[in-house]
């Protein structure tokens, strides 16, 4: 689990409007992780889900449960 990588990614996201838009329009944690990996950050969608509820500066990671979603 690489929470330090997630923190670095979220700090970068706050200062990059294009990146913020990509993240906020992503459907899944895996999609967000792929964006991060493309920029050199090493974390998975599962890592991001485990980060749920954590806050980095102005960003709080929240898992969104969609109706009809299976766990």
Image: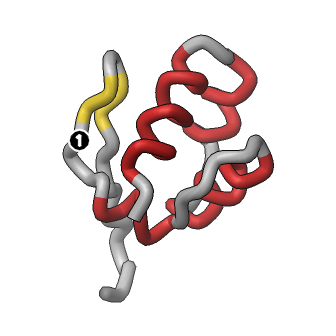
Q: Which of the image's four quarters has the N terminus? A: bottom left
Residue for point 43% across, 71% down: 46
Q: Is residue 58 left or right of residue 44?
A: left
Most distant residue in the bottom direction: 70
Residue for point 73% across, 46% down: 40
Identify whether 51 is placed above or below 28.
above
Colour scheme of the picture = secondary structure
Name the residue tied to disc 1: 54
Most distant residue in the right direction: 38
Q: Is residue 18 left or right of residue 64?
A: right
Residue 37 % position (x, y): 70, 54
Identify whether 8 is placed above or below 40.
above
Of residue 25 and residue 62, the one placed in the foreground of this image is 62
Identify whether 61 is placed above or below 60.
below
Residue 34 % position (x, y): 70, 58
SS state under label 1: loop
Residue 70 % position (x, y): 35, 87
Residue 3 % position (x, y): 38, 50
Most distant residue in the top direction: 15
The answer to which quarter of the image holds residue 25 is top right
Q: Which of the image's four quarters has the C terminus? A: bottom left
Q: Residues within 10 Å of mark 1 (few under 14, many from 20)?
A: some
Instruction: Please give the count of numbered marks on the rendered protein.
Output: 1
Of residue 14 and residue 3, the one placed in the foreground of this image is 3
């Amino acid at each position: 689990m690489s929470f330090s990588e997630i923190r670095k990614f979220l700090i970068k996201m706050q200062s990059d409007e294009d990146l913020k838009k990509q993240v906020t329009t992503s459907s899944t944690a895996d999609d967000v992780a792929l964006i991060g990996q493309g920029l050199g950050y090493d974390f998975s969608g599962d890592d991001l889900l485990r980060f749920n509820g954590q806050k980095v500066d102005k960003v709080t990671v929240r898992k969104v449960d969609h109706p009809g979603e299976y766990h």
